Amino acid sequence: MSELIPQILRFDSLPSTNLEAAQRAIAGAAEGLCVVASEQTAGRGRWQREWISPRGAGLYFSVVLRPRIIQSGWPLITLAAALAVHDALLEAYSLKTDIKWPNDILSNNRKLCGILAETVETTKGRALVLGIGINLTSSAFPPEVQLIATSVELETGKVPDLETILRHLMIAIERRYEMVQSTRGGEETLREWLARSSYGSGKRIRVTNGPEVLEGTTRGLETDGALRVETDEGEIRIVRAGDVTELRPLDFVTES
């Protein structure tokens, strides 16, 4: 299997690192092309939500991948990316994090990192653009979301060094990407994701997907990374898309 060889392009400001990486992928950029920006003026998260990306407050990063596994297995790459972020923060700052399905990185139940994977058709075939946004300081997000967002600085009490995290992240992505494409690598990725996520099994959650709302208890993952949720009626539902929130005891109380 060929090795992922990173080539990093740095920008002072971009509308979106994912958009820049996608445009370069469409034009034929090689696998491993990485785009890093000091700020994003139109950063995006899942479901086209705005990702606040002020200058110098976060790591805004996208990489072009050209996976050699069948496309039905590509969702496992986003799980592998979440593992890579988990690895990098642990190795760089001894920061232990949780993974919320499918790929949000949490610390003390607050969001520290978001991951956005998008497929694009290119001159060299279909590619995957993997975007990662890590909050480095509290200025990475507005005050009104401070109850649900956090940063490396807030969690460690240290001013994080972007280059240190980027270096560890690149090493971790290479390792996890190689693993997920190896023989039985999908099974290993699922096993390790479940070992590092409190959301994988036994977590009471609510899943919102447009008008559909599902509540139940998580019961592991399918082979493609989809979430298994057991309803209160004992039915197993397979979730492949949606927003997941933890249900805490007060959420179970219904109004009379």
Image (cartoon, rainbow, N blue to C red):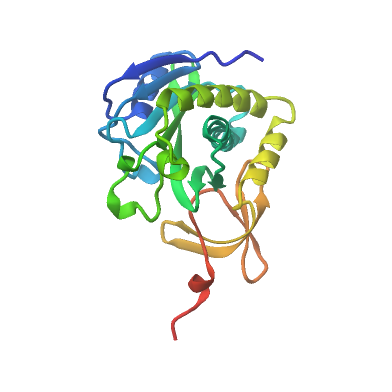
Percent across and percent down for residue 164 are 47, 24
* Residue that protrudes farthest toward the right in the picture: 184
Residue drawn 38% across the image and 29% down it: 18
In this view, the residue in front, 119 or 101, is 101
Which corner quadrant of the image does residue 163 belong to?
Answer: top left
Furthest residue in direction bottom, as rendered: 256
**Residue at image point 44% right, 47% down:** 111
The residue at the far front in this view is: 157
Residue 52 is left or right of residue 131, and the answer is left
> The C terminus lies in which quarter of the figure?
bottom left
Callout count: 0
- Going 62% across and 34% down the picture, which residue do you hit? 73
Q: Is residue 140 above or below residue 220?
A: above
Q: Quadrant of the N terminus?
A: top right
Residue 61 in the image: x percent, y percent?
41, 27
Q: Is residue 215 visible?
A: yes
Residue 183: quarter of image: top right
Question: In the image, residue 14 lies at what x, y percent?
Answer: 28, 26
Left or right: residue 164 versus residue 73 is left
| Residue 154 screen position, x and y as percent | 41, 44
Q: Is residue 51 visible?
A: no
